[in-house]
Amino acid sequence: MKYIKYLVLLLVAAFVFPTAVFAEGEEVISADNRVKVYFFRGEGCPHCADAETWFDSIQESYGSKFTIVDYETWYNEDNANLMQEVAKVRGETADGVPYIVIGDKSWSGFAEGTMTDEILAQIDSLYSTDVSERYDVMAYVDGTAKTEEKKGNDVLALIVVLIVVGGICFGIYKARNTVSE
């Protein structure tokens, strides 16, 4: 009878402790808190050049808050396909450049004024959000987000299995105690 108690304790320890350590290790995602600005552009596009100039002009005041992830799409077919995939994930069509994606918002074309105010507000908003909580469209394009969701389901399945195994062990223990009395 004592062995069953030890077996249950051993099973619980074997399954719970490694998951707790794994979950704790995932909390540290990145030391870089900068917001990713996905910038799809065309070489020679005047609107893209205007956007690049504007992003350069805000480097002094906002440069520590964001980083540009640049994709030239006119001469790079892979980048053009990636832009279409990003737009598809977002439920949009990317008909032209520049196509700018920051978190869960995007802009097609470029014009200073309201658009640049919205971009700055989005950068500020995401910068104040924990890195692990930010929406990143590329995680959905490359499948990382789906994998993370699957990991959560795996942990839930493991917990259910542990409860079932614990219940079976407890049932066996109670049955043996009832028979021996």
Image (cartoon, rainbow, N blue to C red):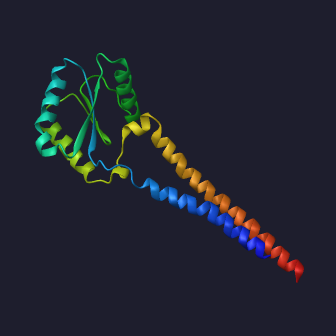
Q: Position of residue 149 (x, y in %)?
A: 50, 47
Q: Is residue 38 left or right of residue 171?
A: left
Residue at left 37%, top 35%?
Answer: 90
Residue 126 vs residue 137: left or right? left
Q: Is residue 164 left or right of residue 51?
A: right
Task: Write the residue at 62% across / 56% down.
Answer: 158
Which is more toward the observer, 43 or 11? Answer: 11
Residue 70 percent across, percent down from the top left? 27, 29
**Quick one: 13 or 120, which is closer to the camera?**
13
In percent of the image, x 35 and y 31: which residue is there?
Answer: 92
Residue 96's place in the image compared with 127, above or below, is above
> Would you place residue 51 above or below residue 121 in this image?
above
Task: Say if 49 sits above or below 122 in the image.
Answer: above
In the picture, measured across the screen, residue 47 lies left or right of residue 159, that is left
Q: Residue at x 43, y 38 (%)?
A: 140
Query: Which image quadrant is residue 86 in?
Result: top left
For the N terminus, the quadrant is: bottom right
Image x and y of residue 135, in percent: 36, 45
Q: Position of residue 148 (x, y in %)?
A: 49, 46
Quadrant of the frame with the C terminus: bottom right
Instruction: Please state the total of marks drawn on the protein image.
Output: 0
In the rendered image, the residue lying farthest to the bottom is 181
